[in-house]
Structures are given as C-alpha cells and as structure tokens.
Image: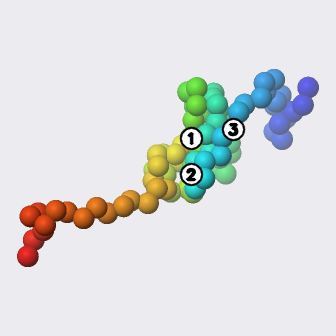
Amino acid sequence: MPALPDGTPAPACAHRVFLEPRGPVLVEGPVEIVLDDGTVARSDRFSVAICTCRRSRTYPWCDTSHRRRERTARPPEERKP
C-alpha cells in the first residue's frame, strides 16, 4: 500500500478536486491539510474550499476574502453634497 511522506498509509479512495478560476480549490471531503508548521487542519464536510491566496481569515479554508469587492454607486438622493 502506498504511503504519504510522513509514512502514514495513503487513503484507499480517490478524492475529486475542482479548480476554480481565480478562486479556491474545491475538494470532496473529508479533508486533512498539513500546514507549514506541521499541524493538521481537518474538515469532515462533504466538500471544502481550500484557500490558495492565503488572504482568508479562516486559512486554510476559504472564506472568499480573495474576491474583489465591487463598489456600487449610491443613488443621487443618498449622496452627500
């Protein structure tokens, strides 16, 4: 049976990964992510969004902070002189 770099057995089943243009990586769960410091973040959800821009307040999970906020013009009656 194949093993992961840390010696633990690799999962027996494949997980589907979806790449979103300019967005997060969507992975069918459950998911474990090994972070830079060696800690493991785990989600048991059926699908998770993994942040690729590192701007998420809930990193490594995506909270859509990577999206640009569009300003909408206020109606003229709401504008201050």
Q: What amino acid is at disc 3?
A: Val
Q: Which mark is residue 17?
A: 3
Q: CA distance from mark 3 to mark 2?
A: 13 Å
Q: Residue at x 58, y 26 (%)?
A: 46
Q: CA distance from mark 2 to mark 1?
A: 9 Å
Q: Residue at x 46, y 46 (%)?
A: 63
- The tag earlier along the polypeptide, 3 or 1, is 3
Residue that carries the numbered disc 2 in the rendered image: 23
Residue 76, horizontal then vertical, whole percent: 13, 67
Q: Is residue 40 visible?
A: no
Tell me the quadrant of the picture where the N terminus can be found: top right
Q: Residue at x 47, y 49 (%)?
A: 64
Instruction: From the viewer's side, name the closer residue of 41 and 48.
Output: 48
Kind of element beneath mark 2: loop
Residue that carries the numbered disc 1 in the rendered image: 49
- The tag earlier along the polypeptide, 2 or 1, is 2
Q: What amino acid is at disc 1?
A: Ala
- The tag earlier along the polypeptide, 3 or 2, is 3
- Determine whether 69 is above or below 5 in the image: below
Q: Residue at x 81, y 23 (%)?
A: 12
Give the foreground label among 2 and 1.
2
Kind of element beneath mark 3: strand
